[in-house]
Amino acid sequence: MKIGLIGTGRHGSRYANHIVNDFEETELIGISRRSEKGREQAREWGTVFFEDYRELIHSDQVEAVIAAVPPVLNLEIAKLCARQNKPLLVEKPLATNSEEGERIVTLMRDAGVPLTVGQTLRYNPVIRKLREELPNQGRLFTVYANQRLEPSDLRWLENPVEAGGGITFHIAVHVFDALHYITGLKVVRVSAMCRTCRTKNLEDMALIHVEMENRVAGIVDVSKLSSSRSGRYEFICDNAQLHGDQI
C-alpha cells in the first residue's frame, strides 16, 4: 500500500520510519509538512515532498493517508479523504471537540471509507500481556494507570483552538483506551483535578478518579512535568495483583 503522510514532526516521523524500515507491504509515497524541514526528510526517506497536504491527498499515487497533525486540521483532511476514497489513520485526538469528531466519523462512514485513530498502546507487548493475564486472576477490584512524560516544546499544544485541550485530551485518551482494551470495561463516571504547572493555558497535570463497569474503581495519573517517563498499570484482583510498565 502506498502511504501519504501529513505531518512529520515527532509523531509523524515515527510513522515514516516504521513505513520505510519495518513493513515490506507499505511504501511512503509522499509527505507534507508546514516547515521546510519536510524537504530534507523527504530526501532522507526517498519520497516526494508536498508543500500542500491537499495536493498529497489528491495525488493518484497515494492510496491511503496518515495524519499526525494538530487536531484542528483533522476535519478538513477527513473531508478530502472521503471525497477521494482514501482510507485515513488519524493520530489522536480525533478532533478538538465532540461535534467535529462525530462529523468526521459520519462523513467517513457515509462515504464507505475506512477510518481509524492511532491508539498505539493496544499493540504494546506489556499492554497485550496484561490483557491476556487479567482474566486468570479472578474478580477485578481496582485499577491504577499513569503516563508521565517530559514537558513538550510544541507551541500549538498551548493553543486551545489548535489543541482542543491539554494533557487529558492528548495523553489521558491513550490511558483510557488501554484500560478499556485490557479490561473490556467502560468508564461510567469520572472526577478530576487538573493543574497548569509548567504551562499557562492548558493543563499539564491531571489526577482522575474513575468508576468503571462492575463497580471497578481506579485512578488515572497523567502529566508532562518531569524529564523522566513512566507508563505504569496496576490491577488488584481476587487471586493476584498484575503490574506492568509499558514504557
Image: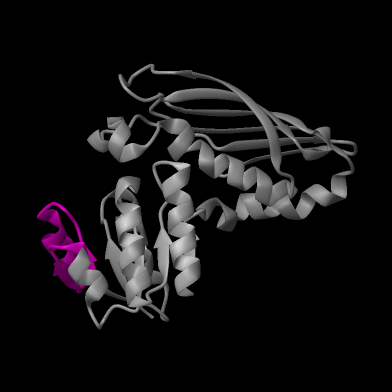
The image position of residue 235, as x and y in percent, is 75, 36
Q: Quadrant of residue 151?
A: top left
The N terminus is located in which quarter? bottom left
The image position of residue 177, as x and y in percent, is 59, 46
Q: Residue at x 13, y 55 (%)?
A: 37
Tell whether 166 sits left or right of 42: right
Q: Residue at x 42, y 75 (%)?
A: 23
Tell whether 151 sits left or right of 108: left
Q: Residue at x 13, y 52 (%)?
A: 35
Q: Nearer the viewer, residue 101 or 166?
A: 101
> Is residue 70 in view?
no
- Residue 134 lies within the magenta run: no
Residues in magenta, as a range: 30-53
The image position of residue 203, as x and y in percent, is 41, 24
Q: Is residue 197 above or below residue 105?
A: above
Tell whether 20 sits left or right of 143: left
Tell whether 181 sits left or right of 25: right
